[in-house]
Image (tube, rainbow, N blue to C red):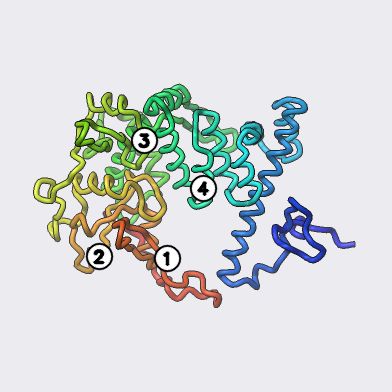
Amino acid sequence: MKPTSLSDHIDIGPRSGGCQPGEVFIAAVDVAELSGDGLRDRLKVIGRAESKLGAMKSQVLAELSRRHNAVTAERMAREELQTSRRDAQREVETADRLTKLAETSQALGDGEIPVGHARLIARAASEGPLDQTFLVEAAKQQGYDQFAKTMRRHQQEMSDDDGQSIHNRQQNNRTARAFTSRDTGMFVLSSEFDPTTGAQIDTVLAAKERELWNAEDSNSRRTPQQRMADALAELILEPQKGKAKGTALIVVADFDVINQELINARLADGTPIPMDELVRLACDADLLPGVFRAATQEMNLGRKRRTASDAQRAALIYRDKQCIGCGASAHRCFAHHVQFWRHGGPTDFANLVLVCNKCHHSIHDDNWQVTQHPDTGHWKTSPPPDPFPDSGVDSTRPLERNPVLRF
């Protein structure tokens, strides 16, 4: 008798003989026979099934925890799911929290929201008040990164102290570890900081990376990961070299004209911060205006220089907030010419967008397009037409790859 595979028993749609209520079943298919759209649809079905299975797993772990205790539930998860101690603990904590969140649990069980989104809601619910209905609806529509930002803004709005308690908790949860890996023998440095401290560190580290990039031989460049490691080592081991030129933490706030006060303080990527934190930062930070004027800030450099100025980079970070393609940190982005420099494009603010190294290569090497939304003015990158044709031949990919990208 032929062994039955898991894929023969998982499906979320009808099948011959009918599905029992709550049953998860995906029929096995030959993915090699699927078109590009078919593969996309297949991923969507698998994603819904994973959500349903995630809900089932949480129900089982929560029941184990109720009958015995969390320690027993974690041990069972490690043994039966062959997961790590840390992941088992996280799974049991999420399961216990979801028992108190009916709407989130229902949406997860119906396959309408991913497991990661449900975990974010469950964790936020343990930290303070929230509007579960609003978050579930947002989770149905948004990708993980966007939803995580929505969650942070929502927590700030729902808090009764302008998010100060959230910020205090994040500061208290700061941690750092330094150890030698048993597997590789490499020294490992790992840490977590509150968003404001993290943004300051990221700003200085990214500036040092750009400094190293500019000093490199263009024919023998380090990988981005190697460059970050070297930048961190230099900042720690050679502090006498000082902070790299052009580093400034960008914090944004709106001015309430009626009440004559600053409101809605946030980091450049949109992460909200308490107003008290903005006041503290203002005491020992360089302040940049939130309105950039071409005449005073030299936003339009034309063909006088190829690289963006510090003022232009600050304005781009304020406008784009992150890589317009994948959402990577703005501090590690290139100022890309929408109309290529080699095609006569000027180094003007309106012709520049922020893109990370990977997305920059996608544009220059793989013909990804940079477009601007006609209504919102937001920029984004889009893949070339028919990037995965059914023929299996991608005619849009050039034969030669550009090994060097410039600011």
Question: In the image, which is nearer the foreground, mark 2 or mark 4?
Answer: 4
Q: Is residue 123 above or below residue 400?
A: above
Badge 3, how many Cα within 10 Å: few under 14, some, many 20+? many
Real-space Cα separation, disc 3 to disc 4, in angstroms: 21 Å
The structure residue drawn at horizontal position 30% and vertical position 47%, both measured from the top left corner, is 213
Q: CA distance from mark 3 to mark 2?
A: 33 Å
* Element assignment for label 2: loop
Name the amino acid type tagged 2: Gln
Q: Amino acid at mark 4?
A: Glu
Q: Is residue 32 above or below residue 237?
A: below
Circle 4 SS class: helix
Closer to the eye: label 3 or 2: 3
The mark that comes first in sequence, 1 or 2, is 2
Residue 199 screen position, x and y as percent: 35, 35
Distance (Cα) linking label 1 and label 2: 17 Å
The residue most toward the right is 1
Q: Foreground: 96 or 344?
A: 96
Residue 193 left/right relative to 372:
right
Q: Which residue is mark 4?
A: 137
Q: Which x, y percent locates residue 257?
A: 19, 36
Mark 1 or mark 4, whichever is nearer to me: 4
Q: For the residue marked with disc 1, what is the amino acid?
A: Pro
- Specify whether 20 is left or right of 371: right
Image quarter of residue 200: top left
Q: Quadrant of the N terminus?
A: bottom right
For label 3, the residue is 272
Q: CA distance from mark 2 to mark 4?
A: 38 Å
Query: In the image, residue 183 lies at what x, y percent?
Result: 59, 37
Q: Position of residue 276 (x, y in %)?
A: 30, 24
Q: CA distance from mark 1 to mark 3?
A: 32 Å
Mark 2 / mark 4, whichever is N-terminal: 4
Q: How many neighbours does mark 4 have within 10 angstroms: few (below 14), some (14-19), or many (20 or more)?
A: some
